[in-house]
Amino acid sequence: MERNYAIDFIKFFAIVAVVIIHTFPNDDKIGFFLLDNFSRFAVPYFFVASGYLFGLKVINTSQLAGYFKRYVIKILKIYVCWLLFYIGYDVLRISLSGGNVKHELSKYLEVLTPLNLFYYGHGTSGYQLWFVISLAWSISVVYLFFRFKKITLLLILSLCLNIAGLFGQSYSIFYEVSLVTRDALFIGLFYTTLGFWFASRMPLIQSFRFEKGTYLSLIGFFLILQATEGYLLTKGLSAKHGEYFLSTILLTVSLFFFTCNNPKLGKGVWVTKIGGNALGIYAVHVLLIDMVDILFNSFGLGHFSHHLIWNLLDATLVFTLSYIIYYFLQKIKPRQPFWR
């Protein structure tokens, strides 16, 4: 199977976008607002890429159950390890806070319910881990439907769920769904299924081969459309902040068409190498955000948090340190990259 270098190449920009979302303030300044909305392609792309790579393996192997089991166990090991790490970090922070430690620990433990920990990925300061557990659930459902040869049906059902999930976010201004919709059911399942569907329809996907300029024009158009949709909803209609939109679907589809039809993109480029470690950066960067904030607050520089130069410095520092730390973790315990 020929390696698709474009996946890791695009993942670099996706993980940069994630760091931007988490380090830049989401406030009324139009520049910050648009940057946040432009970056919303990142997690959907990670789901699609994971579903696609899983699909390529499963479709071309006779040992379906064995590969599925190893894949999901690997995801769960990563999730549990980082979950325990962030729980330990949180307990340490509470213990050193100097307040009523017993009371604060009791409140903290109350939130660590089985539903939060093993479905939503909520409850700890490692809030970004929702993606990892959602991927495990999504891959499991995709595999089940694949065994029954119903992937197209799942794609339709999950698309409906994804659209319904919009009404738990910005679209709740029209009709509110009183559920948490940043989870496997409403986000992860659709985009993971979409990636798997791409893998199962490669001849069809490759028939849509256009010039790079055409793909880039489409991607640029849908990026602007996504930012416009977010702006009209949030600023025009005073809706609550949204993490994904209808236009996110179109943007992600066009971006993955581009990925599939330009597999050599990024070959031998340092950006691609870093993109191959996107999950590691994703897992550790929230810790670095907290530590960098503590550092700058200790120097009395916290008031710069809404300044562009500060945020650029913050994001660059967090991204760089996250990559370096994960790189050394890989050296200490060599293992295969997760999304390979």
Image (cartoon, rainbow, N blue to C red):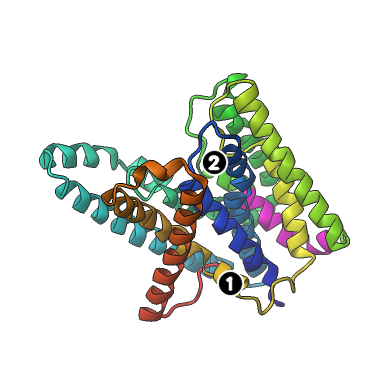
**In the image, is residue 27 above or below residue 55?**
above
User: Which residue is disc 1 drawn over?
Assistant: 63
Would you say 233 lies left or right of 333 here?
A: right
**274 w.r.t. 149: above or below:** below
Taking 178 as reference, is 89 above or below it?
below
Residue 99: % across, % down: 13, 40
Query: CB atoms at circles 1 and 2 under 8 Å apart?
Result: no
Does the segment drawn in magenta span residue 143?
no
Nearer the N terminus, badge 1 or badge 2?
1
Q: Amino acid at mark 1?
A: Gln
Q: Secondary structure at mark 2?
A: helix
Q: Magenta segment, which residues? A: 191-206
The residue sitting at 61% across, 52% down in the picture is: 192
Residue 202 falls inside the magenta stretch: yes
**Image disc number at residue 185:** 2
Residue 243 is tagged as none
Predominant secondary structure in magenta? helix
Q: Where is residue 319 drawn, in percent x and y?
A: 47, 61
Q: Could you say where residue 220 lies in the image, as x and y percent from the top left? A: 76, 49
Image quarter hosting the C terminus = bottom right
In the image, taking residue 117 as reference, residue 182 lies left or right, namely right
User: Who's the residue at 59% across and 56% down the image?
Assistant: 14
